[in-house]
Image: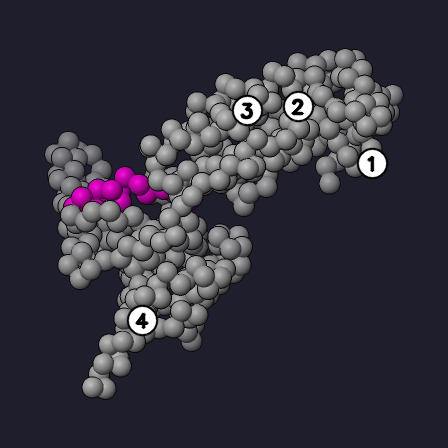
Amino acid sequence: MPRKSEVTFTEQFVRSRKPKDKQYQHRDSSKPGLILRVYPSGKKSWLVEVERNVLRVVGDASDLMPKQAFIDARRMQTDHTKGKKIESRNKAALTLKKFLNTTYRQHVREECKTPQRGEQIVARLLHAFDGLLDTRLDKISEFSIERWKKERAKQVTAATVKRDLGALKTSLNYAVRWNLISINPATKIQVKVGTDPRVRYLDANERRRLIQALIDRDKKIAQERLSANTWRHERGRKKLPEIDGFADYLHPMVLLVLNTGLRRGEALSLTWENVELTAKIPRLIVKAAHAKTNATRYVPLNSEAIAVLRKWKAQASGTGLVFPNPHTGKEMDNITTSWRNLMVGADIKGFRFHDLRHDFASQLAMKGIDLYRIKDLLGHSSIQMTERYAHLSDEALAEAVEGLS
């Protein structure tokens, strides 16, 4: 629970409140029900307790002085007691853009696994709903969202439209909960997505080209380092360390995902303390905080994955993140450019980084591994998600039976 303290609300007091690591709030005993809340972002809001533990937004404390905030708060308490619809002072001026950038941004930063994930959610909404950002929150209608859906479908897949719409619905549900709008206009809007989920995996030639492209990329980067050191030597500058082994994170990460089926986020957040190479059964531990299903799982390592990790660990620090950002040492949020260039070098079309996970599952299915074990290895929450690989498993079983003829 946020901390509370007894103070006197003045303009000077409000201006003097500084943000902390977590949100906190103040109450003034002479203004019962009125609350000043200060967020880590620096945003300050007036809230009113209309009944025990039920809060409503009065307005932005940077725009609304304490005296007027208390007047509005008392009005809102009275309206609530009489069963009337409560309106906050600044609701009419609140656009979708302002809502996402302020109140909702603060909420998702605090509620998501990491603040970075919250920022990604807001960034996605701001990008996807660019045409609605200047619309007042209470003026967004089903018609305007349907029109957005039609235009968005011309640019991206139906699955992407569905994810974007889902993110908007969630944000507007909170706007309803916080009494910023009375209903969520997106509730009844649906997006139809094809029933056949996309399963893309590598054929033998693509796999060979992928591995060769990784090797060629390492050689190219190593040669560029040698050329750079020659240039530095001629000018009396300190040489950079020569590259012996993997050029950077990409080669070992790709091989690891091919052999474990990790999600991209799971690979990027993996730490060495969760890599058990010397255990009786070498394995990775995917912590609940970094797993999509919020459940810890254990992924066994085969001989290739073990060899890759040992080689990479000998080059890396062996502590902290397994695949840190090479420039900052912190967790990377994407590897889009590196992956795109790799696909060009390997001459592979229509293959995403996430498809390495599909390839892992497809290879298991084609070797006759049952779907329940594949489900556990992938960390799926239900067998239905794994059934997309059933036809590959059926083909493997058919070949086995044919061997009896």
Q: Indicate which label's residue lies in the foreground, 2 or 3.
A: 3
In this rendering, which labeled residue sits more in front, label 1 or label 2? 1
Query: Which portion, as a residue range, is magenta?
Result: 330-345
Determine if residue 57 is in view: yes
- Amino acid under disc 4: Asp
Counting residues from the start of the chain, the first of labels 1 and 3 encountered is 1
State how far apart marks 2 and 4 are (Cα): 59 Å
Q: Position of residue 247 (x, y in %)?
A: 23, 49
Residue 293 percent coordinates (x, y)? 51, 55
Q: Is residue 346 magenta?
A: no
**Where's residue 69, x and y in %?**
76, 17
Residue beneath label 4, please?
A: 394
* Callout in the foreground (2, 4): 4
Label 1 Cα crowd, 10 Å radius (few <14 / some 14-19 / many 20+): few
Screen quadrant of the N terminus:
top right
Report crowding for label 4: few under 14, some 14 to 19, many 20 or more residues within 10 A (C-alpha): some
Residue position marked by numbered label 1 in the rendering: 52
In front here: 51 or 160?
A: 160
Does label 2 or label 4 sit earlier along the sequence? 2
Q: Which residue sits at x=22%, y=83%?
A: 403
How far apart marks 1 and 3 lie (CA) works out to 31 Å
Q: Give the overall secondary structure of the magenta segment.
A: helix
Disc 3 target residue: 140
